[in-house]
Image: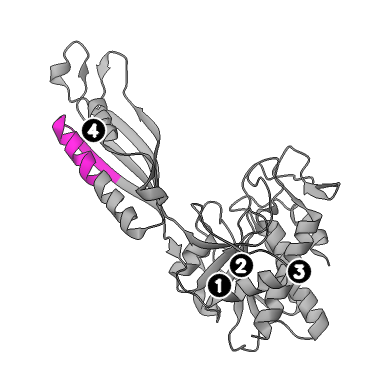
Amino acid sequence: MSSLTHILALVKLDSPSGHEGQVRTYIIKHLQHIGFETRVDSVGNVYGLQGSATSHPLLLCAHMDTVEPGRGVTPLVNDGIISSDGSTILGADNKAAIAAILTGVWQYKKKYKRLPQVELLFTVKEETGGGVDYIQKNWLQSTKAVIFDYAKPLGRIVTGAPYITNIAVQFKGRAAHASEPEKGANALLAFIDFASHIRLGRLDGGKTLLNIGRVQGGSGNNTIPDLVLCTGELRSLSKAFFNQHRHNIQKRAQVSAQHYGCQAFVSTNGYCPGYVHATSSLMPFLSQSLIEEGYAVGYETVFSVSDANILNSMGITTVVLSDGVEEPHTVHEHISVDTLYSLEKLVGRIVYNWAYL
């Protein structure tokens, strides 16, 4: 089967995060047909393994889930462009990669009468978190991995991605009637003081992004607000800057709260570790594979996260490559047929080169 046949079938299968069952069944069927041993872990990640050990397999990884609106996708192919009918996303993020991987390993097996020296991992909940975090690493022999999950023209290599966490700061004061403000402890004033001392936006020479995205509080127009909650997000390509800003937020919140007779409670969630590929033997290998396919190689750090963040933190050196998808996470998402076939060829090149490394 071609990657085009696969993607047109895959995008019709609903797989919003946490509901990847149909895609999982599809992948398992085709992996078993090719000759891979398949396993599914407790959260639904799919593994394509080989019965006989290989000396140094390369892990190819893609995620099965999509964002919403991603149910009832009707794929269209017009003038060489694959898109949805405009009422949903397409789901090429990341089903274009799934299609290319399935085709690449199948073509290798067909031509060389043996499985390529790779292991496969198809994950759940990449868009929301809680999928790749739970993989059974002991099922895998691979120490290096490649992910095609960067919506840029083919030829880009991601060299780093951020540390990220959500931050919530709650200021707790004391309510009072607005006619007697001295009897209250104004949580809003504590928040205003806090916000005025925290720099937001792009910081540290572009290495850090800090945002407060939501503020809520108060109970009435004539009541001194006793509770104010603000939530935001911190991303940084530097672990040192990341930790510094977390510390500064905690410290400033306490200072501002005390100044207005309030309490401050700071919490974080959704932490994702970052990474930087300073040196890795995988980088020149992938660069050479891209050059052999005729691409001018570009290296980029990004502020988005992927399964690579978690895999790198687990000790599996993982590099993200661009996939050629355009306008992902929107109803205008699309990929050209030529790009999909080029992605298929690139997967094949990497699989071949790795087998003969």
- In the visual, does 300 lie left or right of 122? left
Q: How many marks?
A: 4
Distance from the alpha carbon under mark 4 to that under mark 1: 50 Å
Residue kind at label 3, given as amino acid type:
Lys
Which labelled disc corresponds to residue 283?
1
View extreme (top): residue:
179
Q: State which tag comes first along the sequence, 3 or 2.
A: 2
**60 lies above or below 248:** below
**329 lies above or below 179:** below
**Looking at the picture, how far across and down is residue 107, in whole percent?**
80, 75
Distance from the alpha carbon under mark 2 to that under mark 1: 16 Å
Distance from the alpha carbon under mark 3 to that under mark 2: 16 Å
Which element type, helix, strand or loop, lies under badge 1? helix
Q: Quadrant of residue 30 in the image?
A: bottom right
The segment highlighted magenta reads: 250-266
- In the visual, does 84 lie left or right of 353? right
Q: Residues within 10 Å of mark 4 (few under 14, many from 20)?
A: many
Q: Residues within 10 Å of mark 2 (few under 14, many from 20)?
A: many
Residue kind at label 1, given as amino acid type:
Met
Q: State which tag comes first along the sequence, 4 or 1.
A: 4
Q: Quadrant of residue 156 in the image?
A: bottom right
**Residue beneath label 2, please?**
61
